[in-house]
Image (tube, rainbow, N blue to C red):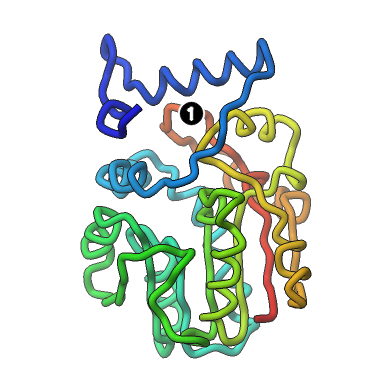
Amino acid sequence: MSNDTYWKKFLGIPKYKIQWYARYYLYKLFGITFEKLKDQKDYWNTRGKEYFSEIIESGHIQYERFFQDMLVEELKTLEFNSFFEAGCGFGWNVKRVKQEFSHVSIGGLDFSFPQLFNSRKYLPTIEMPVVQGDACCMPYKDNAFDIGFTLGVYMNIHPDLIDLAVDEMIRISNKYIIHLEWDMENTTHELREKRIFKTNIISHDYRKLYTNRGKKILTFRTYNDFKDDFTKKYNETKVTTWEQFEGPEKYIFIVVKA
């Protein structure tokens, strides 16, 4: 199915929702799953046109700020002069870092041109140098940034390509690597069941990926470590997205010595 078709409607219902329910029931009734997407460039170049307004207008961004705050609190404990995000989207995380640490140089990369275009709309007073490119082959010199970061980006990279992405992140990061990513071995059974049939969400073993390369894991936290704080902060906040919101169990938090 082409991306243009994917976003069209059938009897007034977006086809991506129909596809979601079809895969959900095929999995729940018959245990059928489908191969993960090997390349999501077309998907995000299409969805990226609406993602900026979608995440802000739905209220979803209020929940995501919890994870962004985790990043900022961790950064306060580290010494760094430059920060980079692979899969920066419209620049939400990178620009927050610049607000909190004004002396720091920032940069971002994304393969979705619409996302990068929308980065000019979000906090226009903050200049964010961005590059359209692939996290598996980044156009930066070795040790270009003190800290490399992703949030919910490596979960879109196929298992055949994740080693390339990790090697590239190690190559361009001089001091630390930080990830907030999906790990199905460190989540709830309920969320694992909701995501296992999705073709665009992929779990990786981040501790293994880095320890196999001789890197030291400085921090590894799961939803069990921060779910109480999340619940206290967002107990009454509502989100208007069509699919039920996924809570603190959606990410693990890992800090690696580069």
Task: Identify the residue position indicated by label 1 in the image.
Answer: 243
Q: Nearer the viewer, residue 183 or 247?
A: 183
Q: Nearer the viewer, residue 49 or 160?
A: 160
- Residue sitting at 48 percent across and 28 percent down? 243
Return the x and y of residue 257 as percentages of the image width and height: 69, 80
Q: Nearer the viewer, residue 125 or 171?
A: 171
Q: Would residue 145 be seen by someone viewing this image from the given angle? A: yes
Q: Nearer the viewer, residue 124 or 156?
A: 156
Whether residue 15 is situated above or below residue 190 in the rendered picture: above
Return the x and y of residue 28 as percentages of the image width and height: 66, 16
Q: Residues within 10 Å of mark 1 (few under 14, many from 20)?
A: few
Return the x and y of residue 209 as percentages of the image width and height: 71, 63
Q: The C terminus lies in which quarter of the figure?
A: bottom right
**Left or right of residue 152: residue 132:** left
For numbered disc 1, what is the local secondary structure?
loop
- Residue sitting at 31 percent across and 72 percent down? 130
Q: The N terminus lies in which quarter of the figure?
A: top left
Return the x and y of residue 255 as percentages of the image width and height: 68, 71
Res 242 → quadrant: top left
Q: Amino acid at mark 1?
A: Glu
Q: Would residue 231 be seen by someone viewing this image from the given angle? A: no
**Left or right of residue 21: residue 250:** right
